[in-house]
Image (cartoon, grey):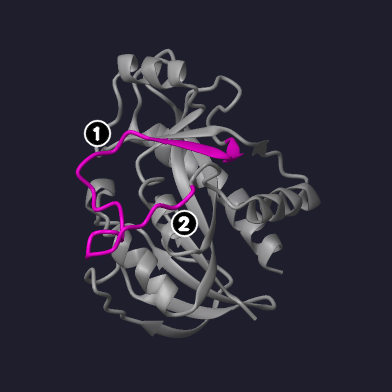
Amino acid sequence: MSLIAIVGGTGLTELEGLELTESRSVETPYGAPSAPLEFGRFGQKEVVFLARHGKGHTVPPHQVNYRANIHALKQVGVKDIIAVNAVGGINAAMGAESLVIPDQIIDYTWGREFTFADRGNVLHVDFSYPYSEALRKGLLAAAATLGINVHDGGVYGATQGPRLETAAEVDRLERDGCDIVGMTGMPEASLAREAELDYACLSLVVNMAAGRSDGIITMEDIERAIHNGMGNVRAILAQWLS
């Protein structure tokens, strides 16, 4: 039975329903991951949960040790990764509390440790289609079974953070074809591809991006959307893992 990993972002720092069997601190050639790996069973599946921003949500997006996170999951035997991300909506159809399972990504980040090909090896992976179609279809099927509406496909624009984007930056993202914007989609996805792990993303829209709403973006509005929408995220994960 292959080992499945859930990488939780903002609003998902623990996986409810996980029958925890072990919490393990793991060291990698790239340092320690964001948090101890939590092993357990969810339904009939063996699962590992990793809090991307640490257990207390203390690690900002640009300081996440993405290489250590992916390497740690790889070295404990993970084959499939579902990443949960909180994002902003650019496409008007993807409003607050919407769920999106993207099929493409554009990387606008900089200065991050973004590859394993830096220790005397040359690694050119195909990244034409960054997300596993099999995992995407599994999430879509789980949502359909539950009657939860999700957007099938979309382009995730990955920005540096930790600040939110300007309205002009979001205009640029829209011209580039982005539907949603977040800060943690890369290099997590490309590192998973380098590590030969299947990877898919389940994104919760927690606010309309800059310039796409009448007022300013507030943390209160974001927290409300997380509170209201994360239940559907957990339900889809539970159905997919059952």
Secondary structure beneath dot 1 equals loop
Left or right? Give the position of 194 relative to 45. left
Category of crowding for the residue at label 1, using alpha-carbon neighbours closer than 10 angstroms: few (below 14), some (14–19), many (at least 20): few
Mark 1, residue position: 163
Which is more N-terminal, label 1 or label 2? Answer: 1
Q: Residue furthest bottom?
A: 21
Q: Position of residue 156 (x, y in %)?
A: 47, 35
The location of residue 222, given as percent across then percent down, is 41, 36
The residue lying toward the viewer, choosing from 22 and 118, is 118
Residue 76 is at least partly visible in this image:
yes
48 falls in the magenta region? no
Residue 113 falls within the magenta-colored stretch = yes
Q: Does the rendering let one see residue 56?
A: no
For badge 1, the amino acid type reads Arg
Q: What stretch is highlighted in magenta?
A: 98-126
Quarter of image, res 71: bottom left
All told, the count of numbered labels is 2
Residues at marks 2 and 1, CA–CA distance in whole angstroms: 27 Å
Q: Main secondary structure of the magenta part?
A: loop
Left or right of residue 33, residue 19 in this image? right
